[in-house]
Image (tube, grey):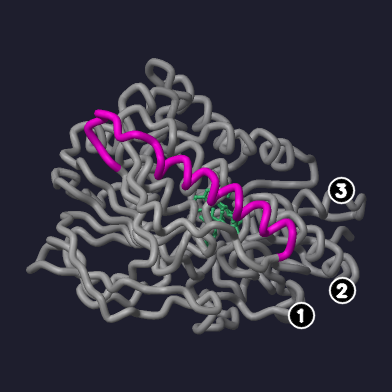
Amino acid sequence: MPVSVAIVGSGPAGVYTADALVASGADISVDIIERLPSPFGLIRAGVAPDHQTTKNITKKYAKTLDNEKVRYFGNVEVGRDISLAALREIYDAVVLAIGAPLDRNPGIPGQDKAGVYGSADFVGWYNGHPDFIDLGPDLNVAAAAVIGIGNVAIDVARLLVRTKKELAEADIPDYAEDAILKSAIKDVHIFGRRGPVEAKFTNVELREMGDLENAELAIDTDHIPADAGDLPDRDKRLKERNLETLRQYSEMPRGDKPKTVHFGFYASPVEILGGEKVEGIRLERTAVENGKAIGSGEFFEINCGLVVTATGYRSGALEGAPFDEKQGIVPNDDGRVDDGLYAVGWVKRGPSGVISSNRPDGKTVAGHILADVHGKKPGRGAFKKHLQDNNVRFVSLEEWKKIDAAEISNAQGSHPRKKFITVQEMLDALN
Ligand SMILES: Cc1cc2nc3c(=O)[nH]c(=O)nc-3n(C[C@H](O)[C@H](O)[C@H](O)COP(=O)(O)OP(=O)(O)OC[C@H]3O[C@@H](n4cnc5c(N)ncnc54)[C@H](O)[C@@H]3O)c2cc1C
């Protein structure tokens, strides 16, 4: 009897786990269960719509889904359509690959004002994730602030100042493209409590900011240290590359582009100002000591009508699985959670690293599964019966391929696809 494995979540971590399981050559059957009809998690709904080269990794993932030992069950949410306990009764092993879809609480007084969004929601909105299409952020404001100094903050800032030409090859939904192109935003401030050495931007993302068609960059030269300090060689090289890029930006003569992205290092937001709606932010100047931001007691304010906090993500608790509230992950020992229960990717490690950082998790957990469990439970047949008995309309791989093809053929101009933005639209495309 083959070992039956259910992988919950079809993002990178889920797909890499499936890939490692089938590559092992073991007698195995792997079912990938995904709450949306569309697969691939944050590759579809997190990676910026103007980064199509990155999104192209889904072509590789599609090959894993095509493997004869793998089945895709889209539009099935564990916790809604089947409990985790029931799933564990059916499969020899269950792998949680559910990601970290919630914003970590930034803890800034005033953060509940209208016009303040977590990046999970805001990024989901411009990427057409069905949960966030009604977010309706008001971009008819003069200035926006993005809190955080990592790649997600850069993505948000960049998207806010993109032009029609720059979005021509993006798979951004029409409503988000219209809002961005009609936006009155002239200034986007990126604020971080710490400095350029501590910033988590990758150099590729940082350099892309130098090529914006419509926006100048503003950085205080005094905020760029002469060197990256005492760091291991590789880190030092990467950080010094960023310092060099920032230094070039700070020394560039100011042009006449209508918008400006301001890099505001050493600035800790202490309050979001305004009435019901955000009107500004109050920040405290900081200095970094031993990697920590220390307040200087000097405060300043900026006006802005939109705030996006990009200060990290966390997983949510799934009934039937243990959960570490503090770390926002499912606690695990190298991917092992409980008998026959495993975790990979962001729900296992927390929200860090790049797409390929999820690959080793898949390999490790595939190894654990093959060492720990034997083919004893019914697997796929019993799962399909559960779905049928409970009238769950799952989306198969063949059906996803039809949805995918329809999105591609609906694309206009040089856009690569026109995403369906509701679950119903995706299901309707199958009729
Ligand atoms: C805004 C943003 C931009 C990024 N850009 C880049 C980039 O350009 N380059 C890069 O290398 N990395 C990027 N990353 C990082 C990369 O996306 C992550 O490393 C990766 O997606 C994590 O994979 P994962 O499988 O753990 O989670 P996810 O990709 O989040 O996948 C989790 C999947 O589980 C599904 N799911 C959740 N709960 C359930 C449930 N109960 N039942 C069934 N299914 C469920 C979700 O719908 C989702 O499809 C970005 C991350 C973010 C947030």
Image check: 55 left or right of 67? left
Give the residue drawn at x 25%, y 76%: 298
Disc 3 marks a residue whose amino acid type is Ala
Residue underneath mark 2: 372
Image check: 319 left or right of 397? left
Residue 93 or residue 134, whichever sits in front: 134
Magenta region, main secondary structure: helix
Q: Is 289 one of the magenta-colored residues? A: no
Residue 209 position in % (x across, y down): 43, 39
- The quadrant of the image that shows the N terminus is bottom right
Distance between mark 1 and mark 2 Cα atoms: 8 Å
Distance between mark 3 and mark 2 Cα atoms: 17 Å
Q: Which mark is residue 301?
A: none
Image check: 256 left or right of 409? left
Give the residue drawn at x 56%, y 41%: 204
Residue underneath mark 1: 339
Find numbered disc 1 in the image and state the secondary structure of the residue it sits on: loop
Residues under numbered marks 3 and 2 in contact, where contact means CB atoms less than 8 Å apart? no
Residue underneath mark 3: 23
Residues under numbered marks 1 and 2 in contact, where contact means CB atoms less than 8 Å apart? yes
**What segment carries the magenta color?**
232-260
Residues under numbered marks 3 and 1 in contact, where contact means CB atoms less than 8 Å apart? no
- Number of marks in the rendered image: 3
Q: Quadrant of ligand 1?
A: bottom right
